Image: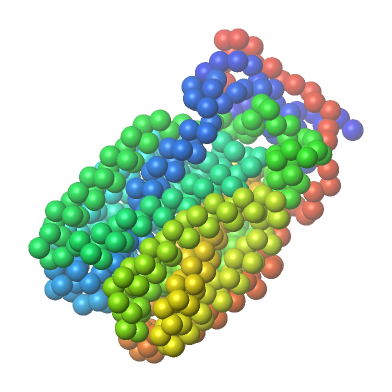
Amino acid sequence: MTTEPLSGTSASATAGGDYREITDAHGRVYRVGESDRQILGLPRWTMVALPWLAMLAISVFEYAFGAAEETLSRAHHWTSTNTFWVLSVWIFFQAAVSFPAGRLREKGILSSRAAMLTGSFCSLLGFVSLSHAPDFWFALAGFGLLGGLGSGLIYSTCVNMVGKWYPERRGGKTGLVNGAFAYGAVPFVFLFTYGFDTSNFHTVLDLVGVYVLVLTLVAGLFFKDPPKNWWPEEVDPLHRSGDTKSSLALAKNPPAVKQYTPKEALRTGVVPLMWLCMLCCAGVSIFGISFQVPFAKEMGFGPLIAASSMGLMSVINGTGRGVVGWLSDKLGRRPTLTYVCLVLAVAQFGVLWAGETGNQTLFLVFAFLSGFGGGAFYPLFAALVPDYFGENYNASNYGMVYSAKLVSGLFGGGMGAVVVASWGYIGAYVASGVVSLIAAGLSLALRRPGGPDHGRRTVRLPRVRQPGQATA
């Protein structure tokens, strides 16, 4: 049976060349025929490299904060709980901006380039505010609010950019870019542990802000989204037989049956389930990032072990995202997510056990697992959302799921400090392990909207854009 192609065209213009719009058995439209260079003026791998660079820069916000906590508390005369609330507010706004920014991008009000440049300057202001804050509330507004909004704009734009340019193999590419958000902080973990004190904290934080500004600004200048429904010219979206990397990835993670709007995605019931699962995973991850170094010191481990455990956690947190993204292309996104949640649970109990027994080697081993599990779920969700709901509204749809982090940030950071103060590290780590197991259970219930893929091969009826014809 022949399926008539849809008559609408993308809202984005191309740099030149004809394209065809084809449909599959479900009526989903694919825009094919244009190369990445025709649209972007560059090969599409640059939309992996540049987001990777920007994510590398903003990683210092979250993943090095635990190492800086002690000096920040002394320098500003804050309690440890005050300091971690600054991080929690940052996490709240970093996650909260994702959905509204996505809606503005999809409506054409905010371009990806404008989002990146705005985020760059807000990020600079965040570190300058943390450096020169006259009081706790100023730091909350500067680092927490402005820094959170800035880094959130950069994060969401980078993650969504990769999925748009690599719709056929987004797992590994998304994991690579997402991973930079963790291991990019490793040099700063050691800097804040060994070279950061009350005598130089102004200079160090100001320079870190400039570093973030430069890298994100340079990367953001080249950002550009592909047209809606775009598909790479060398990949056939209707035929998934064969042994190519793209065919194998599409067989395990078939494209969404349609392009779901945010309202439609919500009505499927899958978005709320994803949100709860990410809430659990992100809360555990943020707890580990915030308290692993303080816990190591509490257990009597020296500063080298404490810093090394966090450095190892950051490296594996980042590299693990790339590895898991690649595995999900081969094993399927949903099963891989369940495995990651189970690893995260084992790591929480293991870190506690190694700390309580004073075993430094095991502590580093479980820090390895904690880092792996505490980051690997992010690219899986970033790839699952467009897998289930399509690419056209991915900025908004992923923004809804990612908003779980704004709640988990409060529990993992600020509330984590309250739990540690009330229950001690034993109670906190046990609770963290149990929450990870709950996340694993929730992941088992995730199902692709529209049911299983029943084959999408149809006869092509091309719509060709004539030279000089404008797109609607």
Q: Tell me what residue is drawn at x 89 percent, y 33 percent.
A: 1
As drawn, is 447 to the left or to the right of 106?
A: right
Residue 413 placement (x, y as % from top left) = 36, 72
Up-down relation of residue 264 to residue 166 (above or below): below
- Looking at the image, the residue that sits furthest to the top is 467
Up-down relation of residue 313 to residue 104 (above or below): below
As drawn, is 258 to the left or to the right of 356?
A: right
Q: Tell me what residue is drawn at x 29 percent, y 57 percent.
A: 188
Examine the image and state in which quarter residue 438 appears: bottom right
Residue 296 placement (x, y as % from top left) = 35, 78
Residue 245 placement (x, y as % from top left) = 70, 40
Q: Tell me what residue is drawn at x 59 percent, y 56 percent.
A: 324
Total label count?
A: 0
Q: Is residue 404 visible?
A: no
As drawn, is 453 to the left or to the right of 11?
A: right
Of residue 345 and residue 126, the one placed in the foreground of this image is 345
Of residue 218 and residue 396, the one placed in the foreground of this image is 218
Up-down relation of residue 356 to residue 157 (above or below): below
Q: Quadrant of the C terminus?
A: top right
Examine the image and state in which quarter residue 91 appears: bottom left
Residue 19 placement (x, y as % from top left) = 65, 21
Q: Tell me what residue is drawn at x 43 percent, y 37 percent.
A: 50
Up-down relation of residue 317 to residue 428 (above or below): above
As drawn, is 288 to the left or to the right of 83?
A: right
Q: Is residue 245 visible?
A: yes
